[in-house]
Image: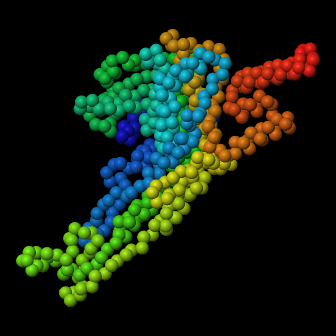
Amino acid sequence: MFKGIITAIRRWLQDVGLLKGIKGLRHHKQIEIDEMFFNRIDYWDRLYRGFPESGEHEIKYTTVDGKQNKRRKMSLNLPKVVAQEMASLVYNEKVEINIGENETLEKLFEEIKKDNKFNKNIQDHLEYNFALGGFVIKPYVKDDKIKLSYVTAKSFIPLSWGNTGVTEAVFPNQFKRQKYWYTHLEWHVWEGNNYVIKNTLHRSDTQSELGIEVPLTDVYENLEPEIRFRNFKKQSMFVHIKPNIANNFDIHSPLGISLYANATDTINTLDTMFDSFNREFRLGKKRIIVPAHMVKSVVGADGGMHRYFDPNDETYEAFDFGQDADDIKDINVVLRVEEHIAAINAMLNLLASQIGFSAGAFTFDGEGVKTATEVVSENSKTFKSKQSHEIIIEEALTELIDIIVYLSQTFGSLPTVSGEYQTSIHFDDSIAEDRTAEAERIYQDLQNKIIPKKRAIMKRYGLTEDEAKEWLAEINEENATATADSLDFFGGSGN
């Protein structure tokens, strides 16, 4: 949808000299993201949606009449399957976001999660993240509450970036009203130490052009043209999340790539195999060859026109053996079902290795693709990929909470968060079959005195440092009480 307008916006940004980036830590250079990269995002999106456009996933074939016909190639829709599976592995209802030693922030964040249906939205957009190569969370204040806006990779244009991530960006939103196409651009830029959010509106006669800038009041009644935030630390008012995969299409780009970006040929091959598997039953159906003269209408004894065979029965095929031939031949085609299933499973193992899953993670049983990632080993490729993606998600959610704290301190209508706070994210690792082994290793480390008790508790139960200290204090208190009670029982003083 946004492919044409994204191109128009980027060319306009280049013309006015606003498109800039940071190549590396010491090199500040004008960098333009390759326009082809947005074409790739658009292609990944079409793969994810199963090529709904007419003609996108069609193939030609020839009939006995010599005509070139088209039909839609059947698809396993694997991009949807793999993106959904990885999203459910890295984030589900068992993930815990802990905020230690700050009740105000903890209560505020719980309200934000509830009002914004956070767990549902974050998992949906993590699926889009793995499909398209990233997404953005934008906190904002409306009606005295903090809201969360989600933006996919198709509607996110970085303006400048560094080794810490994207620092400036523009978010386009295109819509049609009456006969005009409108594009709302929301700018997030730095002006010195001030973080500025600007809103501009453009109008065009066509969807592919940005058009002229018009007043915001043409569409929006209460939208401010500019909002300035002062004394804001050098962090953007949005959180950019992407798959933890190196971008081998544009190594200077801050944008991420799809989970299946380097496996599109494999996915297309699997669709060809699946299409052939289904055609096997259609083309390999039972047929009976009869002489052509037998399917012609003849005059019966009653004077009416009759046929030997039902002309609507697809089982029968007419063939001219000559007028004297009366042979009827039964043709039974051997279906290659097992061969197709074996070939598809072999290719599924290749796909799994390309996208970060263990071999056997996806299997085809003749009815559909099944996943086998409910229980995996901590040493498996699936589990390691899951943990790798969690690194970026944990950093992003920590940044999100920092932005929420700043907003609470900026807008007087919100509960003001003050004092220290710690954020820790405990992901669901219950899919690992050797959690008991991990607990035993931690216990052995404690016995060998090579890990502090506090660190062992933090690692085993996913607690913050303050929570682990509190837990240890309770343990020590209980142990002290137990010792005093035992001394009293044996006649001691209890001191």
Residue placed at 40% from the left, 49% from the top?
50
- Residue plotted at (54% across, 54% down): 362
Q: Is residue 166 visible?
A: yes
Left/right of residue 329 with respect to residue 450 in the rendered view: left
Q: Position of residue 360 (x, y in %)?
A: 58, 56
Seen at 53% across and 60% down, the residue is 345
**x and y, in percent, of residue 187 in the image:** 45, 26
Residue at 57% over, 42% down? 89
173 or 457: nearer the eye?
A: 457
* Vertical order, 340 against 165 (above or below): below
In-front residue for pair 19/183: 183
The residue lying toward the viewer, choosing from 434 and 255, is 434
Report the residue that reaches farthest toward the bottom. 324
Left or right of 199 on screen, residue 450: right
Q: Is residue 47 above or below residue 179?
A: below
Q: Is residue 237 left or right of residue 484?
A: left
**Quadrant where the C terminus is found in the figure:** top right
